[in-house]
Image (spheres, rainbow, N blue to C red):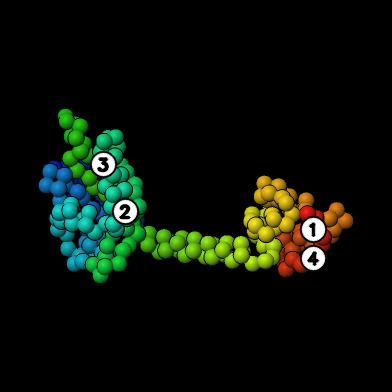
Amino acid sequence: MLEINGLSADQLPAAGNSRPEKYTGALAWNWHLPTNTVWRSPPFAALLGYAASPGAKSFTEWTNSLHPADKELTINTISAAFREKQEQYTHEYRLQHADGHYLDVLDKGYIRYDPETGKPIGLVGTLTDITVAKQAGRQLKDSSEQFRFLAETVPSFIWTTNEKGQTVYQNQQFYDFTGYTPAQTMGHDWAAVIHPEDVAPTLAAWHEAVATGQDFEVTHRIRR
């Protein structure tokens, strides 16, 4: 049973009257402020590549395991929670694995205050490994940036739409040629640049492509 100053985790008001281990997919920790030590559950220790045995570690050991780029913001987030008398906080940061690489984690901490002094006396919390999701997000961002770089350098008009057929992106070459702005051609307003005689057949082909998923190919005149 986790305890903070003799109080079980079940007694912490911010913990929802349940032990941290019961949170699905999460790992438990307990920061005992009077001794400034942090207890990690066996699954938590195993996640970081250490022996899966409970035992108190110094708070400094935890801060040393934070990614250098995340350390200041993470500590400031916790300090702000204390200062503002928050009952809980949520924060994302990176923790170092025993082999040296870093894991992305989502940390949820629940704070217990001394009823007489109002000072924080302990925390319990849960940790969720979000490394896979964060890596996927970074890869998607990289792919998006690569696409935009190529789209802005090729000597052609490039555009993309959403699943409803609404334009969400057009490259700068398109705007330089037509003289239009993004506000004038986003959504379904892109037809404004097409020659009036070509609008109807162009839209017919476009709507069919959106409805059927077939390739869209049409010849029309664009006015400048």
For mark 4, does the 10 Å Cα neighbourhood hold few (<14), some (14 to 19), or many (20 or more) residues? Answer: few
Q: Which residue is farthest left?
A: 35
Residue at disc 4, secondary structure:
loop
What residue would you read off at disc 2? 70
For mark 1, does the 10 Å Cα neighbourhood hold few (<14), some (14 to 19), or many (20 or more) residues? Answer: some
Three-letter amino acid code of the residue under disc 1: Ile
Q: Nearer the viewer, mark 3 or mark 1?
A: 1
Q: Nearer the viewer, mark 3 or mark 2?
A: 2
Does 180 appear above or below 216?
above
Real-space Cα distance between discs 4 and 2? 51 Å
Residue at disc 1, secondary structure:
loop
Q: Residue at x 21, y 50 (%)?
A: 30
Real-space Cα distance between discs 4 and 3? 60 Å
Q: Which mark is residue 222?
A: 1
What residue would you read off at disc 4? 218
Which badge, 3 or 1, is on the more N-terminal residue?
A: 3
What residue would you read off at disc 3? 79
Where does the image place residue 31, in percent across and percent down from the top left?
19, 48
Q: Is residue 90 visible?
A: yes
Does 61 appear above or below 113?
below
Q: Residue at x 65, y 57 (%)?
A: 172
Label 3–label 2 contact, CB within 8 A: no
Q: Toward which corner of the image does residue 202 lie, by quadrant?
A: bottom right
Indicate left or right for 218 with 70 as reference.
Answer: right
Three-letter amino acid code of the residue under disc 4: Val
Label 4–label 2 contact, CB within 8 A: no
| Relative depth, front residue between 49 and 52 | 49
Q: Residue at x 67, y 66 (%)?
A: 155
Residue at disc 3, secondary structure:
helix
